Amino acid sequence: MYVGADYYPEHWPRERWEVDAKLMQEAGFNVVRLAEFAWVNMEPMEGCFEFDWLDEALAILHKHDISALLCTPTAVMPAWVARKYPETLAMLPTGKRITWGVRKNNCFTSGAYRLLSERITRAMATHFADTPNLIGWQTDNEFGHPVCCCDTCRADFQDWVRAKYGTLEELNRRWGTHFWGHKYTTWGEIQIPAPSGTAWRLAGADHLGTHNPSLCLDYQRYCSHLNVRFQRDQVRILRELCPDHFTTHNFMGAFSDLNYYDLAEDLDLVSWDNYPVWDRPAISYGSAAAADVMRGLKRKNFWIMEQTAGPGGWSVFGRNPRPGEIRKIAYQQLAHGADGQVWFRWRTCTAGREQYWHGLLGHDGKPLRRYREAAQTAKEYHKLAPELEGTTIKAEVAIVYDYETIWALRIQPGFPGNTYHEAMQRYYNALFRAGVNADMIKPTEDLSQYRVVIAPDLFILPDDLAKRLTDYVSGGGVLLTDCRSGVKDETNLCHDRTLPGLLTEALGIVIEEYEAMGDGVEYTVVGKQAIEGQYAAVKYVDWTTPKDAEVLASFEQWHLESFAAATRNRFGKGSAYYVGAVVSEPAFYDQLIADVLKAGGVSPVLAPPEGVEVSVREGAGKKLLFLVNHTEERQQVSVPSGKPELLSGETTSETVTLDAYGVAVIKLE
Ligand code: GAL
Ligand code: ZN
């Protein structure tokens, strides 16, 4: 079990390094991450390397039994790189290059940048290969930005497209360029479009977002490929020179400008940056789902590489984690499969843009409340380590998590505010409240290992996936899908079929029409059978005609009277549910999910009170039940009695009491 902090020795005088290492050791820390922005400190002039300072810092940490991860420092290029090789700076859609400074300035197709990145990676790997306390490498920092509109990138995109489609005729067909007279007659005519996504918003390119959706989707795939290729070049060097060290990257949870499955494939381990403390205290549904996405990338446990240690902000800052909250955030991730925990950052910096991004220690460097809470957590983690060994979440419910669908929905949401994550969280949050774990899976994953598969907003539905979902249901699986599923094919053309296309038989419904509603328009949804009560449909409804399916909810408005808001269809040995509306009230989803779980024969270990999260890690003959109180109220939770609670050392009676942000770890087996 590794616990520690992101540490920047280069920000502090050398006399302080010993003090820091000692404080870390006293806190029970045994790992730090170093050097992700320290390129110029290590290569102050082209080809001249200076590693002495880092050797010294590593040696001091080693003396205090602290291991280290080093980073390839390519997220911030030195000023001399930009000066000597201006083509390494990414070009904005305006045709101007990024002004050097801040971070993530580079063009990923620049030959010079790729060579310089390989050289510093090779120099570091060669120099540090035998450092006794070095255990692993992080590539770069938070891949994803920027996108670049330079001529090299455009030519490279054209090559990528050519390799994919082979002939222009095929490209024109798959992109549907008969529309608006967009037919290409040479490869050189293909332009960089404006895909949607945060990178483009940062680049100020939103106004360009009306290009051909098929072109946009392929461009998004291409941008992802550039990052994956750049990382692969580094990983190859690290593997060759440091075969005993693991490789990782700090992913960003729900961030989805890149295909994270592809980025994870070349790494040994996924780690991610979790910053859940913003505005008002709230139940951290998003961090739970993001953790499951991270665990799903390689289908194994992950690390936290950065996690909230104090108020955060670059100009204004947010609230301070309240007593117990730093620990609670850590336990939520532990419960979802985090086998390493690193806080961002050790000490708040007195210089630079992140002066307000607070660490465990403040500007004054004193070990106060936040430090003490992290230390308590670290010590508990070490105590739990033998019990955690070999355990992970073994979910019976899967959620299909597909970057192509996420991207295609960003390019054309269909109705305002429609994102994959919004749709997914409606079901995910209901599972969370029911106390049921879920795996996030690629659409190509073997579905038969799950009792329930939820495929929210499955916008891009290739025929083979529709067939596999149908076979899954007929073979006894329980499928739940909803609005806008099955609209598109792999190249982002609409299928020329009546919805829900190839899922029609399994779902037992037909959707001949649908509509988006403006703000303030609501239709009344009336529950039937398993769903009780009345709810509001907002934003979007399918005009769903039930054929073989039973109606679980209908509409009250006269023009929707013959249509269903939610259906359930028995098909073969399984069942398939469809929700053709966006419903405001969580209670609607809670009842629906209860019925879906019942159909799948999935029963939670216990029914938690609202705001208490339940998660189970098991394996190697062990089974651990985690309870995490996301609220500031004391909570009573009914639990299996006569079991050891590992943090207090007590044996459970019928209930466990959790204080504000309290946690419990109960050994069920
Ligand atoms: C992360 C990043 C860190 C730091 C932190 C706080 O996204 O990886 O380097 O910038 O945010 O802003
Ligand atoms: Zn470029």
Image: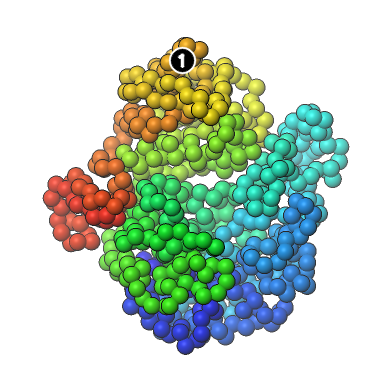
* Snapshot quadrant of residue 397: top left
Question: Horizontally, is 380 left or right of 47 in the view?
Answer: left
* Snapshot quadrant of residue 228: bottom right
Residue 383: % across, % down: 27, 66
Q: Is residue 239 visible?
A: no
> SS for tag 1?
loop
* Snapshot quadrant of residue 431: top left
Q: Given the current orientation, which residue lies at the most extreme bottom position?
A: 15
Q: Residue visible at 35% across and 19% down? A: 528
Q: Residues within 10 Å of mark 1 (few under 14, many from 20)?
A: few
- Residue at image mark 1: 557
Question: Horizontally, is 213 left or right of 188 in the view?
Answer: left
The kind of residue on which mark 1 rests is Gln
Picture layout, residue 446 above or below residue 613: above
Residue 36: % across, % down: 56, 69
Q: Residue visible at 28% across and 36% down? A: 603
Question: Horizontally, is 318 left or right of 607 in the view?
Answer: right
Picture layout, residue 564 above or below residue 632: above
Identify the colour scheme used. rainbow
Q: Residue visible at 66% across and 45% down? A: 220
Residue 618: % across, % down: 31, 51
Foreground residue, 126 or 353? 353
Residue 582: % across, % down: 47, 29
